[in-house]
Image: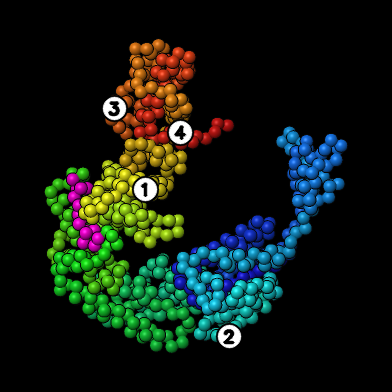
Amino acid sequence: MNTFLLEIGLEEMPADVILPALKQLAEKIQATCEQNKLEIQKIDTFSTPRRLAVLLDGLIEKQDDQVLEIKGPPANIAKDENGEWSKAAQGFAKKNQIDLSTLFIQDFNGKDFVFARKEVIGKLTRQILEENATEWITGLYFPKNMRWGRYKMKYVRPIRWLTLLWNGDVLPLELEMVKSGNLTYGHRFLHTEPVEIPHAQQYSDLLHEHHVVADYEKRRSMIIEQVQELEKTHQFSVVLEDHLLEEVTNLVEWPTVLLGNFEKDFLSLPVEVLVTAMAKHQRYFPVYDQNQSLLSHFITVRNGDSHCADVVAQGNEKVIRARLNDARFFYQEDQKHELDFFNAQAQRVVFFQKRGSLAQRIERIQSLSQYLATLLQLDEQQTEDALRIAKLCKFDLQTQMVYEFPALQGVMGECYARLKGENELVSQGVREHYHPRYVQDSVPQNIEIVIVALAEKLDMLATAFSLNIVPTGSADPYALRRMAQGVVQLILEAKLMLSIHDLNTKALEILEAQQNLNLDIPKIVEELAQFFVLRQRFFMQEAKIRYDVIDALLQGKELLPLQQMQLAEALHEHLESPVFKRAVEAIVRAGNISRKEHASVPDSIDENTLSESEEKELWKVVKPLSLSKLDLDHYLQTLFVLEPVITKFFDKVLVMDKDMINRQNRLFICQSIASWSLLYIDLSNIVFAKES
């Protein structure tokens, strides 16, 4: 068995691109092996800031030889009147490089065709891998690429070396800037000379000898183990947040964990400020006591060994001290001003070009909040609190603290609002109106905050779409998908009977009136509707609703998002029941007939001309549906009442009667049934298991 190694050596990559790129590389190599029927006993991946590598073990020497049976043209055109092979057969043989004498006739699905057998000699595995290596490397997707030197190729970072080994042999590969070889590089500072790899299987061990832990999981485990040792020694607790741990692991090749300290008087700052300064800016892990109170320590991970560790720790202490000194200064300076001072500064901040200032955005959020408060019938105190939250929701963006630490938007707003005497709900609302910030994030528990959170997101979407700023498959710079997802989540989790169509319309009307625009509101609302459908679909999928039920509900004409979820829950226990299946089939049949004969469906029915008892009975049940209001609670009940009557009607009555009056009456009844059901759900999308 054989071993193959591909290593791409680069300048240090951004931490967040390493694992996705490594996954892409491994998938591309696996796909090539599967397409060429090359079995792999084991595939290992390696990555550090300076390398992406894949190691395949247990590869066969060459592909198996194959005898392929190739189907050609039909036999009736493969020979001429003299029994000789026709031009069609000759062309088939030439195309496949087959001698005419080897062609034969064989049955295929009840019809005779020309066939030929062709022996295909298997390629050498190393040849297949060598031929595809360039595409694997150049085909990797990175969010941002760069060009360097005289080279035309763009890549995430300059490629410095390529290692391409088949066992101990170098496979030739040349990109415009580098040729493949059997050399790799150890730690940038602990071992600066190139390292020769005698055999691909020795790759990981050789790197370890030269101070590179190439396995991501091993580096991660080393960090965790060293942190746990410090926890035992000093009797404190370290929270290893997953995202930060992943980032730090991808920043180092030889991790050494160090403990640092800062002055205790910095603990008077809000905890979020300290944690943000450490985690977001310096990639340090905060340290807590047994009661989860923050301590004046931090954990940092050095890319190197323990040599002069105390000096490195002191250097990190100087950096965090300076950062916290800045934070303390900003915190004290911000408190010298009233909240209205910061709101006034929003006049000078452009929100979107051609769509006014941040102050105007705040005004729109207030107007939308007032609209929602009225719509949801909030009392006077609730409305007052909601409007106060709306007025203050963006003031902290003008503070020095948030300018320096953008991740603290909302957090500092809550802190400063509380310090300036705002009530607890308003202070909390300044922070929580950003929620939900991501999938599975919590939603505010107070309706006053919920409506401001809705207004803020709806205004952002309306403004962006009014400028034709619409997310594409690869770009969503203003996080509009996340905003729309937040709107859906707020409506559904807060159980609000709100129409997304009406909300978008109102947001656009407020924008148009404020900015004196001439928007095509119906067109923009339709674009937003299509955008929101995708977000609703995602939310329903996360709720484990069947795909066909989702399709059916989203095709309904009148239900609000919350009603769609409620109907999905109500349908769940009936989906596999025989009576539900019969009801669906009956409704769908009525819809298919009326849709097919749409041109013949009249505008009304002449009840006096109904001739058959079955159609009279059906119309008696259907007639009230056209006059009744949307009633979600009784939809299923009505569906089950309709089923036997519709079934009996179709069994006994011919819809497409020769008599035109009878035909039109019956088509009208069918259309009435279908139209009623479509207000709720398009049952034609429901899929039932086939009966065995």
Name the kind of residue labelled 3 in the image: Ser
Q: Verify whether residue 371 appears in magenta.
A: yes
Q: Is residue 451 visible?
A: no
Label whose residue precedes the other's in the sequence (2 or 1)? 2
Q: Which span of residues is magenta-colored?
A: 356-374
10 Å crowding of disc 1: few (<14), some (14-19), many (20+): some
Query: Is 629 situated above or below 659?
Result: below
Mark 2 vs mark 4, CA separation in Å: 68 Å
Label whose residue precedes the other's in the sequence (2 or 4)? 2
Q: Which numbered tag is attached to residue 684?
A: 4
Q: How many marks?
A: 4
Mark 3 vs mark 2, CA separation in Å: 83 Å
10 Å crowding of disc 4: few (<14), some (14-19), many (20+): some
Q: Verify whether residue 262 appears in magenta.
A: no
Mark 1 vs mark 4, CA separation in Å: 25 Å
Tell me the quarter of the image containing the N terminus: bottom right
**Residue labelled with disc 1:** 527
Label whose residue precedes the other's in the sequence (3 or 4)? 3
Q: Are marks 3 and 4 in contact (CB under 8 Å)?
A: no
Question: x and y percent of residue 347 in the render?
Answer: 20, 65
Mark 2 vs mark 1, CA separation in Å: 58 Å
Viewed as shown, does residue 337 lie left or right of 401?
Answer: left
- The residue sitting at 39% across, 59% down in the picture is 476
Question: x and y percent of residue 533 in the render?
Answer: 38, 46
Name the kind of residue labelled 1 in the image: Glu
- The residue sitting at 38% across, 61% down in the picture is 477
Viewed as shown, does residue 195 lie left or right of 566?
Answer: right
**Residue labelled with disc 2:** 193
Secondary structure of the residue carrying tag 2 is loop
Task: Examine the residues drawn in magenta and state their main secondary structure.
Answer: helix
Q: Which numbered tag is attached to residue 628?
A: 3
Name the kind of residue labelled 2 in the image: Glu
